[in-house]
Image (spheres, rainbow, N blue to C red):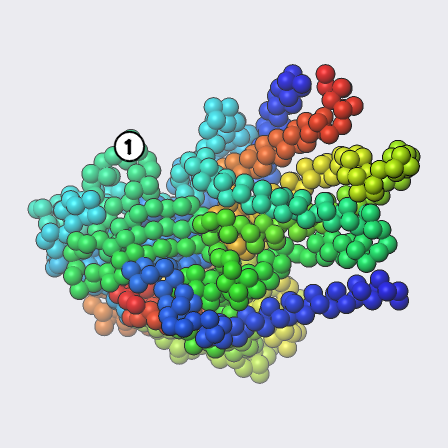
Amino acid sequence: MWKYILKRLLYMIPVLFGVSFLVFLILSLAPGDPAKAILGDQGTPEAIAQLREELGLNDPILVQYFRYAKNLVRGDLGMSYKTKGPVSKEIIARVPTTLKLTLSAIIIAVIVAIPLGIIAAVKQNTIFDGLSMFIALIGISIPIFWLGLLLLAQFAQKLGWFPAAGADSWKSFVLPGFALGFHSMASIARITRSSMLEVIRQDYIRTARSKGMTYNNVVRKHALPNALIPTITVTGLQVGYLLAGSVLTETVFSLPGIGRLIIYSIQGRDIPVVLGCILVFTIAFSVVNLLVDLLYAYVDPRIKAQYS
Amino acid sequence: MSKKTRLLSLALVLLLCLSIFSGCGGDGGGGGETGGDSGGTSKKTGPAVDKDTVVICTADETPSLTTAGHNAVAGDYVNKLTHNGLFRLDRDLNPIPDLVAEYNVLKDDKGEESIWELKLHEGIKFHDGSVMTADDVVASLEHAKQSPDIQSYTQSIVKIEKIDDLSIRLTTDGPSASLMYDLSHHGNYINPKAQLDKLAEDKEILNNNPIGAGPYKFVEWNRGEQLKFTAHEEYFNAERAPKIKNIVWRIIPEGSSRTIALESGDVDYIIETDSNSLEQLEKNSDVTVMKVPSVSHNWLCINNEKAPFDDINVRKAIQAAINKEDVVTVALNGTGIIAESQTPTGMLGEYTEGFDAYNVELAKEYMAKWGGDPATIELDMICSNDTKRRAAGVIQDNLRELGIEATISSMDLATYLSQTADGNFTGFIGGYTSNEMMSFLKGVYLSSNIGSSNKTRLNDPALDELIIKATQTLDQGEREKVLQEATKLLNDLCPQMPLYQDNILSTHKAELKNTFITAGGTFFAQEWEW
């Protein structure tokens, strides 16, 4: 098992360099000069030339990338073009917020989605099924941005239950967590429902029922564990969606996270900061995928046997 | 048709009702809610924290707290809290002494008034308790000259010398009418020499621990979220000492979220109010909305080097065909004034003669003088945000009257800045903000700035001469005449199509007193009180 984990972690290294090279290339080839973006309309031709030289933008793109990669090997993410401070400092300051947001979103999503999916499956073609799937449909269709503003208007402005902006306390993450998690909740609920429907039609479920077990016990002890594998896969994949969704959610709720930082940095062509943020997202996504794979082993003994 | 379908339909209707209910609640909710849930002063009407604190919210975070390390408006606001310049702009945007107690302008060997002797107030204390001397001024101005970010504000100074502990001598490259304005810019604010000397070993010292002599001391910066400041108890100017002890400076990028934060009581002051929320906020008796016409001049910029826009008749035809009232209504929700000249109104040297107002018949006459086929004109208007896109939409309709089929393109800001500076465009919606006419003219029309801020790419030696002459004329009356002459020439040349000057929209809780904003967007937080 440990060998497998180590192998997976080592695989991440070429992935990180591959991603960083691609992103660097795309950003460098995209129109828009970082020096002109920083100096704005008031930059003189001399100032633009001086800043380009200071930032090393006059070197060929490959030279610029290898300089970046050399520093990356030493754990140095470089200096921000805009703030002139270390990129790592900018990112470290924002990681906790994005982490809290993503965690709250996934917790809200899972807590709501799994019971919703189970109810929809065991009460198939009833009012509960219709209502559960209607909520799931809304969750998939509704834009995060709009839902966020709706929640702010209702629960921050009108009722005053939650703060309208900032990341001061746990309360600050309830509305953004819900806005971000709503979409994932819908996906997880739908997959749980279809997976449960498939499992409860299996012969071994019928056998368990015929042995006299109550329906609730059959669902809890036999159907649910078997139906969870696809749910875990989708939940893991949803982390990628949640990281991408944090960009919008952090903007609406004014949360100082990586999502907002990446938007500002792309707008300002602050290439080192964009690269740093993308690398953090890549690491997070890879680690979550690894955790999902490991979780399979605990849920399904057959997979555990493969590892050992 | 079935029960299930009816149920789904009912649920959909309920959801729509909820969203409409929430939306309507927002419109009138501010006032109504406040009245309902507050017995006396509540968070929604009174201070968000307490009477010793004001919570300000703004759209953008400063890239840096280092005074010479950026040229961002968001940074200018916070630098003004922590630092001072030798001069500052008053409420009418005129430069007046700040750290300087007295100054004299002397003639050099050539007989030109290019030597400035400045004397500091005695006993000015930095936030660390040290006393400001001429050494700090010399070190700060020398440091500022190295920074590309603020180069246009440091170019005229060629020599910086200490005379004694409180006196400095500055030599400019000829007479400089813009020097006092330049020294009012945050890039030239004064930092302690002791800190500047440590820059070699700690490049981030000015950003991590900014020490100035300003009315507020820096406390902390939670990146992306907020900054905190506290009053400088030993501020040198007792009359302008802070009345509210603490400032919390929150960053809320989304316009609607800023409005909600104010109406829910979480913040006390919004620097940039979302114009879409204006009507709602004006109905709310618990908040005060401030509307001030800004000095930001916005236009349809035309590339004067590309045919047929190199023909003055085509430019004048487009200029006369644009209904600027409609542009203000559509693009700004009516919150601005129409442009009446090639240079902004509200500045020394403003002049409207020779500028054609909206007149379609006149526009058609200009087109006839040009003699070409309007259908062959290819005009693509690049826009980098929604306001610009709305303005371009009105212009597109107006130009159809002349037979011109203009198109609209969208670009992100960085691409837009590069493409327009490089001259890769026929037209774009843009603007320029400056606190005074000289730097406006230099930035927008001086031929040496082609490739950066002169985006019309106008190259007129007579105009260049007038701009340089204005910057060298120290007598204000004489300078005004030169500036008017330059504006008149520009109105005749019609290099671009000015549209509007938008309003600066700031909003705050009605209990906050003594608020004021200048046409340049500056506010004086140390004068506020609850």
In the image: residue B484, left or right of residue B44 = left
Q: Secondary structure at mark 1?
A: loop
Q: Total marks drawn?
A: 1
Q: Quadrant of residue B399?
A: bottom right
Please state which of residues A206 and B440 is positioned toward the viewer in this rendering. A206
Kindly identify the residue that appears in the image at 14 percent across and 52 percent down: B124
Identify which residue is drawn at 24% across, 63% down.
B243
Mark 1 is surrounded, within 10 Å at the Cα level, by few (under 14), some (14 to 19) or many (20 or more) other residues, namely few
Q: Chain of mark 1?
A: B
What quarter of the picture does the C terminus of chain B occupy? bottom left
- Looking at the image, the residue that sits furthest to the left is B164
Where residue B296 appears, x then y in whole percent? 41, 66
Quadrant where the N terminus of chain B sits is bottom right
Q: Is residue B406 visible?
A: yes
**Residue B487 horizontal/vertical position (percent):** 37, 71
* Vertical placement of residue B37 versus A245, above or below: below
Q: Against B509, is A189 above or below?
A: above
Of A111 and B491, nearer the camera is A111
Q: Residue at x 63, y 73 (%)?
A: B397
Q: What residue is shown at x 55% (from left), y 62% (from top)?
A: A155
Q: Is residue B446 visible?
A: no
Q: Position of residue B308 (x, y in %)?
A: 58, 65
Question: Percent from the top left, x then y, of residue B378?
Answer: 63, 63
Image-based side of A72 in relation to A288, left or right: left
Query: As drawn, which residue projects farthest toward the front?
Result: A212
Reply above or below: A119 against A80. Answer: below
The answer to whether residue B391 is left or right of residue A54 is right
Q: What amino acid is at disc 1?
A: Ala
Q: Nearer the viewer, residue A110 or A16?
A: A110
On the image, numbered disc 1 is attached to which residue? B200
